[in-house]
Image: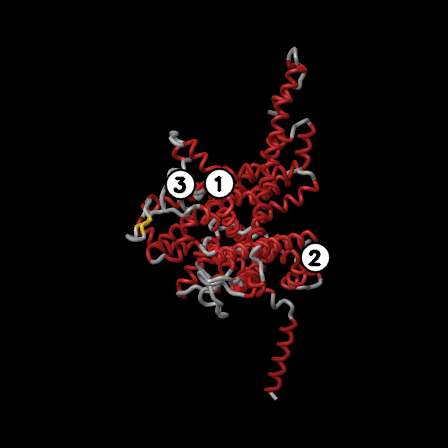
Amino acid sequence: MTDASLTGSTPSAGPQPQIKWGRVRQSRRVQDKILRVTATGATALSVFVLFWILGMLLWKGGQGISLDLFTKITPGPGTAGGGLLNAIVGSIVLTFLGIAIATPIGVMAGTYLAEYGRGSKLAEVVRFINDILLSAPSILIGLFVYVILVMPFRGYSGWAGSVALAIIALPVIVRTTEDMLRLVPNGLREAAAALGAPTSVVIRQVCWRAAKAGIVTGILLALARIAGETAPLLFTALNNSFWFNWNLTGGISNLPVTIYAFASAPYDNWQQLAWAGALLITGAILFLSIAARALINRK
Amino acid sequence: MVAISEQTYKNATAVTRRDNPFRFDPLFAALSKAAAITVLVLLAGIMSSMVYGGWDAFAKFGTGFFTGTQWDTMNDNYGGLPAIVGTLSTALIAMIIGVPLSIGTAIYLTQLAPGWFKGPVGTAVELLAAVPSIIYGMWGLFVFVPLFAAYFQVPVSQVVEGMPILGTILYARSPSGLGILSAGVILAFMIVPFIASLTRDMLDQIPTVLRESAYGIGCTTWEVVRHVLLPQAGVSIIGAIMLGLGRALGETMAVTFVIGNANRLSASIMDPGSTIASRIASEFNEALGMQMNALIALGCILFFVTFVVLVIARILVSRVKQY
């Protein structure tokens, strides 16, 4: 198109250069208009869908928010009332246990990639595989944990659930830790090393400290990522309509699987609870994402 | 006397060892290396557990597992074709709808939006990526599906009924709104934020001087996008699209809500179907014996397909960093 319009603008275009020039300009302007309208429309549609989903959650879930939600456990089939206390507590336990497993491994692996493995083949492979793991389907991670932790021990458990969540959180933490450590200027490392500090002390006292906000952001993002994961919990932590064991064996009640089970159930109070739970979980995740963003932008 | 001097000697060495600031170094390096290797072990573990768990089904049905259309739990006869076709067709529909939307959004965010507007809109698009898939599923089932059935399926089915090809592909026998096409549309909305934010970052990395010189010779925005930006970012945008494809292939909860979970192969995209992920999610907990093996075997197929897609995606995306 550019070629045509350029030749169109040369004076040698013929006896009526004015008309030809005008026609070319017209078609270019129409093309440009089409791009502007479709691009703006596409963005408007995406933003509209976000507000549609949030509006629906607020409207339908807002009606279910009450004190009972936080003080009573999930009701049995056909039982009136009830709340989500066991599911909320179970979800918090599973999520934080998952993060507690993933954080040390993730931060250490990220440290290896940024500090020790610069230019090494192993680091390159780990970085690549970590990126693959970052977008691997979460249901396959659920199947994997089922095969290694549920099948051998013959039973669903909260431990299996939190391991599955930890595997999903790990690549997020590895990736952000590495990126954030790379932002630490080399001068800091060299200055610390020149004072006689060994590598491990440089990393712990200088690099980690300098990158603290970034690493915390990564952990928050990982938390947001796993808080709403449903598929990997289906075959690992399962669900439980009662108060769970604190040794985390047997099914553990958790919000996402409860929402999944209750949303399409034929009982009105179950559906109401599912919407309220959906509102809680989305609110928590959006809050975490915005907090992570604010933390990183403050620097 | 001897005992005392030995004691003194031991104390002396202990003090020097404790004072040695380098004694943690090898341990710390080894720990971090071990953590990095854990990542590799996990992926290898996922791969081998899928092959191990699905081995019996692959051994029993052979290639018939890929081509069989039966899913018969009574006679333990399993074929994965409907789920494989469902996975590929929902992902294809998601791509057809989602890719233009994502690229349009990325172009708006980098080229058209006024400065003060970029931040909030960009954040909104990224928050769309943070919404959990089960919420998309609920939105799909309770809000989108009824509207889709009333305002799209019913009129379209009436128009195409009896037409040669369209009459097969687009005709809904029971316009409930559930089906392959609805799942594809929901998936499209789920992948837009991913592809759009990656593409936006890539377009932002293109040196401003290229864009400005194109505007300087009188190009319109369309010409700058078409002849300068897209060719510059080209390969990595394809990488971003492949990442979105990887996500669409393995998406579970949203699809399980809206696809209808039918175990048959249908010629119409308006009819209920199933994907590999939705089949696993809805059947796994009641599955025993060979059915469980067959489900893990389906998971194995999904793993290798997404693995290949993601490897290509990462190679293409990483190219952008090199120039």
Three-letter code for the amino acid on which mark 2 is drawn: Leu
Where does the image place residue B316, in percent across and percent down from the top left? 53, 42
Three-letter code for the amino acid on which mark 1 is drawn: Phe
Q: Residues within 10 Å of mark 2 (few under 14, many from 20)?
A: some
- B98 up-or-down from B277: above or below: above
Q: Residues within 10 Å of mark 1 (few under 14, many from 20)?
A: some
Camera-nearest residue between B9 and A203 = A203
Q: CA separation, marks 1 and 3?
A: 13 Å
Q: Are marks 1 and 2 on the same chain?
A: no
The residue wearing badge 2 is A188
The residue wearing badge 3 is B174
Where does the image place residue A111, in percent across and percent down from the top left? 60, 58
* Residue B167, quarter of picture: top left
Where does the image place residue A253, in percent across and percent down from the top left? 49, 63
Give the residue furthest to the top. Answer: A15
Mark number, residue B148: 1
